[in-house]
Amino acid sequence: MIYLDNAATSFPKPPEVLQAVKGVMEKIAGNPGRGGHPGALAGGRILERCREQAAMMLGAEGTENIIFTFNGTDAVNLALKGFLHQGDEVIVSHQEHNAVMRPLMGLQDGGQIRVRMAEPDAKGVLSPESITHQINSKTALVVINHASNVTGCIQPLQPLIAAAHKMGVPVLVDAAQTAGTERLDHLQADMIAMPGHKGLLGPMGTGILYVASHLDMHPVREGGTGSASESLRQPGMLPDLMESGTHNLPGIAGLCQGMKFVQCFREEIREYERALARRLEEKLRNMAHVQVMGAADVEKAAIVSFNLLGKDPSFVTDTLVKAGFALRGGLHCAPAIHAFHGTKGAVRVSPGLYNTEKEMDALADEVSKIQ
Ligand SMILES: Cc1ncc(COP(=O)(O)O)c(C=O)c1O
């Protein structure tokens, strides 16, 4: 099996990640923040080291701005439900995943907020004006998907965030497809949500939400934090305000090693994965009857989605899976981007750092056989 579904979750993970998970399961006898015995303290140090690693990667003010979550969806939910108030309006991009759209639509259906969509250009790229045009006195937040999990199209975050800030509106970035390969520390984003199990190479069941110190958040999940235990109310300070209950300590230990790995090789990984995706995309674009989603000349993360004209994407996906390629067909939980491109589904290929040029060529050959 050739694994080409890294946009869903990365595989395999570096050996350091596996060792860290196993190390916690075998050696840490205690729950961080729940007791002063050696195991609980050792667990607390693992959490703190991971927060330090994430804070460095994201240019955070401090480790308290790093909230551990269970995945990317959980990070987005905490961000939206922990920040928005009754009557707020939210601006989103057309690239948003259901991790963003479903919580927002739930809030809108409950009469709490209103969602507006920014209008991209013909290639699917947002301009600062497309955001500012939608801002009014009720706008509380702009949400931007950094890279589409369908087309890979990367949005030019810096000018978009600067434009929203100029009008006093904070920005949440969904970095699910860019954390680990793109720089996120210089964006001045107010919140950044990401899974730990994709580009950060951590285990499933991990995620991170960065929350800037100046935001006024309310808790989404209340419970034990191991701090201020005399109070029946949730502590007011980050990260405890947003983190309740026992952490996924084995997962977080693995995530810390995954982040260390990608921070050492971020640019090399980015260039390598992008080169693999470009190689495949060029081969596919040269085939008659193959339609690659998205414009050829926009900046893209290492994701290539395509359709064979006249063939159902699920048939093409099933055929490729039977031929030994692990990849994903369908709508990829992002219906708006398919509506934008006029597609009802696609076959998605998302190479990772362990794939090779030979594997890209083998896939292209198989597509041409199906064709
Ligand atoms: C753009 C985007 N946002 C959010 C998510 C949700 O991440 P998770 O599966 O970790 O909840 C995904 C997952 O594929 C994604 O691609």
Image (cartoon, rainbow, N blue to C red):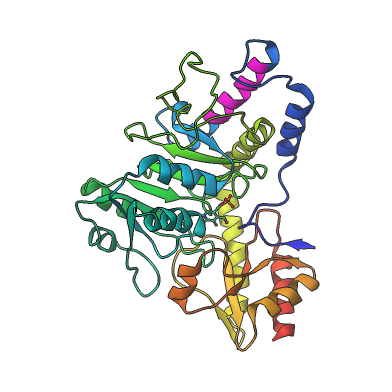
Q: Is residue 335 visible?
A: yes
**Residue 178 image position (x, y, % from top left):** 51, 52
Compared with 18, 61 (above or below) is above
Asked whether 337 or 151 is in front, the reply is: 337
* Picture quarter with ligand 1: bottom right
Compared with 177, 123 (above or below) is below
Q: Is residue 258 magenta?
A: no
| Rendered residue at 74%/84% (across/down) | 369
The quarter in which the N terminus is drawn is bottom right
**Residue 336 image position (x, y, % from top left):** 45, 69
**Residue 229 image position (x, y, % from top left):** 51, 16
Q: Tell me the chief SS of the magenta region.
A: helix
Q: Is residue 180 visible?
A: no
| Rendered residue at 51%/31% (across/down) | 243
In the rendered structure, the answer to whether residue 197 lies left or right of residue 178 reads right
In the rendered structure, the answer to whether residue 228 lies left or right of residue 258 reads left
Compared with 14, 130 (above or below) is below
The boundaries of the magenta stretch are 40-52
| Rendered residue at 47%/46% (across/down) | 77
